[in-house]
Amino acid sequence: MVSYLLLAMILLPMLLAAVVLAVTDRRFRNVCVLMVSGILMVSALLIIKTGAAFVEIHGTLAEVLDYVIFAADVAISLIALYFGFKFRSIVLAVLSIAQLIPLVLFHIQINFAGVEKAFHIDHLSMIMLLLVNIIGPLIAVYALHYMQEHEHHQHLTASRQHYFFATILLFLGAMNGLVMANNINWIHFFWEVTTLCSFLLIGHDQTEAALANAKRALIINFFGGVAFILGIMFIYSRVHTIAVHEILTYSDVSVLLIPMALLVLAGFTKSAQIPFQSWLLGAMVAPTPVSALLHSSTMVKAGIYLIFRFAPVFLGTWLADMSALIGAFTFAAAALLAISQTNAKRILAYSTISNLGLMITLICILDIYAIYAAALLIVLHGVSKALLFLCVGTIEQAIGSRDLEDMDGIRQRLPLTAFLATFGAISMLLPPFGVLITKWIGIEVTASLPPVMFLIILGSACTVFFWAKFIGKLLSHNPEAEKIETLFLTYQGPLAIIAVLALITSIFMIEFSNMFIAPFISSAYLGSSDQTIPNVLISDFAGFYPPAFFAVTAIALLLVFILYNWLKPKRYVQPFLSGENSGHNQFYSLSDGKFNAGFRNYYFSSVLNEHKLTYLMNSIASALLIVLFGVILR
Amino acid sequence: MMGILQTAATKSPWIVHFDCGSCNGCDIEILACLTPLYDVERFGVLNVGNPKHADILVVSGTANYRNARVLRNVYDQMPWPKAVVAVGACASTGGIFRNCYNTLGGVDKVIPVDVYVPGCAAKPEAIMEGVLQAVQVLEKRKETGETYAG
Amino acid sequence: MNIQIIAATILLAPVIGGLIAGIDRIITARMQHRVGPPLLQPFYDVLKLLGKENIAVTNDQSLYAVLYLVFNVITLVMFVLQMDLLLILFMLLLAVASLVLGAMSANSPFSKIGAQRELIAILAYEPILISSVVGMYFVTGSFSISRILQIDRMLFIDLPLLFIAFTYVLTIKLRKSPFDFSTSHHGHQELVKGLTIEYSGPSLAMIEIAHWYETVLLLLFAGLFFANNLYVAVAAIAICYFAEILVDNIAARLTWQIMLKSTWIPGLLIAVVNMVWVYIKYHV
């Protein structure tokens, strides 16, 4: 049963990707995408229902698979090499060779051996599967209409949508493989597939900017890939196994510290931690569904997954503390940089980087609540960020701009989308929603590492600033704006579903934690190592009770509703312009001409110069990374 | 309950001061009311500078074609109940500018005026007396439930 | 028992807050050689505002004023119920956020500038407020007020620098001069009341009442530093608030740049110094 589900989740999307690529008919493609989406959602739920399990593959099939995956992995490196020559990028060429040689050598060394228990579905995999297979397909469905509009704006002679959807399907299949594989070589293969897919998706529009940013994404992620393969070789040379579950049971931490550092480095590149953040920002040139996919459920979460997977091995060491510090630094620095942005997508991108930093910090803290918070944040952030990106994409299609300053009166122009976007932003910032609660836990658990905590404090202040500006703009009122929203089931439908999911995940955080995170903690953290972490449930955390938060908020809203009915404005007047109004927000100038009173948000572009600050932040983060490796490589 | 609201209304008249191009004589006297010597805050008077918070509009200077629109806007942006005090000869009647080619005359040509404070310039004591009379007007408006009349 | 406490808080806090505001106005007047308004003047003001017409620029603007009030009340109730301090700070943030959103929703330049300035103020005071809480955590080992109150030491002795930083940002939080630039109190009229400019009548009254709750909450927060002795705490709160009034009257308005620099560099620095020594004292 489980093996069929695995086929449905990994192989089927990949196969249908080939079909979609071959058959360019639009209707057929839509049916394919909808079908795969449905299958992925159902299979993910079924696989979770079956519970944690190992899936064994024996005999010829296993051997064939090992060879196929090796060949495909080599092929990816060769493709990268090809692009290295095509773009005349020496760095890329060198990186792809640096990946290719260890890959081949390592497989010769282990004699193309495989792992009997090829797949391991534990509760961390389930959390990731939920995220990938519910949010991912919804984004794909949304993209059906979006890409139609997108190509309409581009005035293409021939549609390139079949490339797009083939890549998306391949991507989803690879993510499923990544989070379930137990053979670390296979994880590396799926890892490289996601790298390649994101490269193709970022470069999809074939514009100069798109290609340049795609190249950058490929280079940075290939750097991570090289670190990954070197990490694998180190692990094998120390513990002689490539099965993840065996590596995790290895008790002597000091032996595995160097390879773990390499894997963490790989995770940093994929999760766009400073100084590797530039590829994720560049990825903004891609069509919005791509940004949504990269930022919420796939790609960046792959890096988090890798670190989370191996965290039990190195928790409590210098490596964990330094990683927590780098994560916290990214959290604060990205939030600070987000303040200076006017481009709505870039604000969201910086917010993603910032939240990924917080996730890494939480993962690397030796505290059970930190683990709970990290796992919760992965899900909560994934859902909210998918919603936000899709909303910004819809707004961009409608008004032709992604600049926050052009979004005055968006509430009247696109009521539903603006409402959902506001909801998404509020769920990222304010109580009673989960993201803030994980931040709260973050501050409380990092009391053992004051510098980390200090950075989180600074970061949360900056977070408030840029989110409040964002929400304020979405809610601003402009009486002259007219409604231009058109509704499609496959367009706003996924948005509404994701919004409902965001609400549900926040309300049922405790049930979610008990169902998934608690078993994960007891199997991954408590089973093997000594009892440094007490076995408690998230509901034991002081004052943590989301239903109560929601109840209080609901009562508050009820009160507000009653008071508001009494307070309803009796008369509408124009805003105060010293009496000089000549219309709503319009005034007479000296020469009796009419002028609009314009007002922009503050962005501090002179103080917070993005270019200079990025340089500074990159230097600091690189220094931290060097210190990390310097200490570990003794 | 309504009784308490009415008493409160008389104890906290917030004023907004609008200058229709007066010679500044009256304006200085209006501001003098806020100084330690007269201290109108004793009566709860605050100079809020914003029509949306104000109860009493205190106008100085002659209404003319140019400022009539602005004066009207400021008056419209005040919440009911409200009262208007015209301070000084110019605001009351147009004063020495009365028959100029560009003037309309007193501010009552543009908005309904409740209290006229004579003088050129009006004395602070007179202005305070005018404001406190406007408070009586406010109280009466509150009692009769007179609604906004544009 | 809890319900009685909650009811008492909700009813008593605005009375206390209003009286504090009245005392504030009288002391301010005396400092300026004036007689000043009667003690109950803030109550007269609010009652008058409640009886006035509610005019607005947009229809949901009053909603945010109510949200501001309700969240301030909830925050104060949470404080009185001795819950987690960090959570209380986050709720307080929610309250301010509603005020900012209300100001931004009205399409008015003055209120939008006020909103941006208030956001800058949040950016300035939030790290120090959280640092104070963390400092208390280092001393007492808990973020929850009920535990902090059980400590038999005076927190001020361990956290003097944090208390100084806290009183500094208290000026910003109470929107008093020299940091009153988001609402512009008193005679400062260049922003014509910034944030609250588009509110009138009952909605303005809501904001005023919410501000009373906020004042009570912040003064109680200051009292936490002296929590083991009630008399000292009350005296400290009184001195603290008197100092705020004094500064309010003698200081000219500063720019937001100076505010941000002074809170983030010297302010956070002394906060960190204090946190470091407390951490070493109790945890190393």
Image (cartoon, coloured by chain):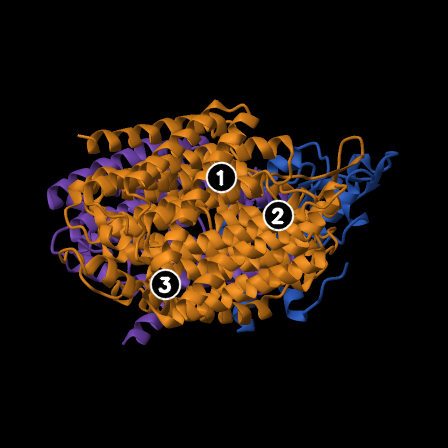
Chain colours: A orange, B blue, C purple
In the depicted view, which residue is nearer to us: C91 or A444? A444
Do discs 1 and 2 share a chain?
yes
Q: Are marks 3 and 1 in contact (CB under 8 Å)?
A: no
What residue do we see at 20% from left, 31% from top? A631
Q: Please state which of the two labelled residues, at mark 1 or mark 2, is closer to the viewer.
A: 2
Which type of secondary structure does the marked residue at label 3 adopt? helix
Q: Quadrant of the C terminus of chain A?
A: top left
Residue that carries the numbered disc 3 in the rendered image: C13
Q: Quadrant of the N terminus of chain A?
A: bottom left
Which type of secondary structure does the marked residue at label 1 adopt? helix
**Residue A564 picture location, percent across and down:** 57, 67
Q: Residues within 10 Å of mark 2 (few under 14, many from 20)?
A: many
Q: Which label is found at residue A280?
A: 1
For the residues labelled 3 and 1, the Cα–Cα distance comes to 49 Å
Q: Please state which of the two labelled residues, at mark 3 or mark 1, is closer to the viewer.
A: 1
Do discs 2 and 3 share a chain?
no
Q: Looking at numbered disc 3 in the image, what kind of residue is underneath it?
A: Ala
Q: Which label is found at residue C122?
A: none
Q: Looking at numbered disc 1 in the image, what kind of residue is underneath it?
A: Leu
For the residues labelled 2 and 3, the Cα–Cα distance comes to 60 Å
What residue do we see at 68% from left, 70% from top? B144
Residue A423 seen in render = no
Residue that carries the numbered disc 2 in the rendered image: A164
